[in-house]
Image: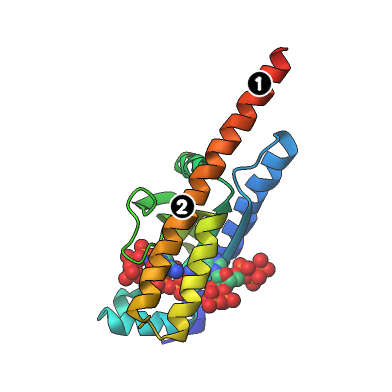
Amino acid sequence: MDWEAFLAPYAQAVEELKIKFRGVRKQFNHETSHSPIEFVTGRVKPLASILEKADEKHISYDRIEKDIQDIAGIRVVCQFVDDIYRVVDMVRERNDLQIIIEKDYIKKNKDSGYRSFHLIIEYPVQTIRGEKKVLAEIQIRTLAMNFWAINEHSLNYKYKGKIPTDVKERLKGAAEAAFRLDEEMSKIKKEVQEAQRIFHRK
Ligand code: 0O2
Ligand code: 0O2
């Protein structure tokens, strides 16, 4: 199996999608007072992680491109929870990609405490042998959700996926605290906007 050739269209998709979503942020910043996008990152899943996931989930090599849907990953980080749904609506309207699956882990968080909105999309990449459609995962989350997820991810790495029960419980507590912070910030934002409207009327 020529893995380098297999991964090339995914790398192309990640680069293109990063440019496109960073372009959206730039346009919002230029034309409005608030961009729903704070920053955008992306990565191609390392080959070792792809093979590990295939092994764990009993996915044969010829099924990897269908069954591992986050080989290409884009992450869109927002300030507020509302912004996440604005970004989701925007992605739904785009005609350069197609949404295959939507997973709302914000309304219903994962057992770990993880929250984010995931979109699995199909994205067409132009290659020298014509168009190749690849699957990609877009993770959309707030800064607070991101802070939690990157910390939990590095603990998972440290404990090789077997986080001790007491640490797990504290992480769940921290996830709730992060969510309360998001809710509180949203309330403050609305009050500030309301105050500004009243001020302008006067
Ligand atoms: P780990 O342990 O895998 O998290 P840029 O210069 O900004 O265009 P750059 O700096 O090469 O691109 O990378 P970027 O996009 O900032 O990503 C850096 C880290 O974020 C990587 O972590 C990625 O794993 C992680 N990451 C970014 N976007 C995604 C995503 O959409 N999905 C997933 N799963 N991870 C993402 P490290 O440093 O490799 O470590
Ligand atoms: P990495 O290192 O980010 O690439 P599964 O992966 O079996 O749980 P599924 O359906 O393949 O389930 O995907 P899911 O759970 O919708 O989303 C997969 C990705 O979401 C993960 O990729 C993580 O990036 C992120 N994610 C999901 N759950 C958690 C969690 O509890 N904590 C953190 N920190 N991230 C999570 P990978 O491949 O697991 O890893």
Q: Residue furthest left?
A: 58
Tell me which corner region of the image, top left, top right, bottom left or bottom right, holds residue 126. bottom right
Q: Amino acid at mark 2?
A: Phe
Q: Helix, strand, or loop for circle 2?
A: helix
Label 1 crowd bin: few (<14), some (14–19), many (20+), radius 10 Å:
few
Gap in angstroms between the C-alphas marked 1 and 2 = 27 Å
Q: Residue furthest top?
A: 202
| 202 on left or right of 13 | right
Write the residue at 52% across / 69% down.
Answer: 150
| 174 on left or right of 13 | left
Sequence-wise, which precedes: disc 1 or disc 2? 2
Q: Which residue is mark 1?
A: 197
The type of colouring in the image is: rainbow
Q: Is mark 1 within 8 Å of ligand 1?
A: no
Question: Who is closer to the viewer here, 37 or 107?
Answer: 107
Label 2 crowd bin: few (<14), some (14–19), many (20+), radius 10 Å:
many
Image quadrant for the C terminus?
top right
Q: Are the two marked residues, 1 and 2, in contact with CB atoms closer than 8 angstroms?
A: no
Tell me which corner region of the image, top left, top right, bottom left or bottom right, holds residue 43. bottom right
Q: Position of residue 179 (x, y in %)?
A: 46, 52
Is there any visible trace of residue 69 in the rendered image?
A: no
Considering only vertical position in the picture, is 2 above or below 13? below
Q: Amino acid at mark 1?
A: Arg
Considering only vertical position in the picture, is 57 above or below 9? below
Is there any visible trace of residue 177 in the rendered image?
A: yes
Task: Identify the mark at residue 179; answer none if there is no mark.
Answer: 2
Write the residue at 30% across / 74% down.
Answer: 63
> Quadrant for ligand 2?
bottom left
Q: Position of residue 94 (x, y in %)?
A: 50, 42
Question: Who is closer to the viewer here, 55 or 150?
Answer: 150
Q: Position of residue 30 (x, y in %)?
A: 74, 39
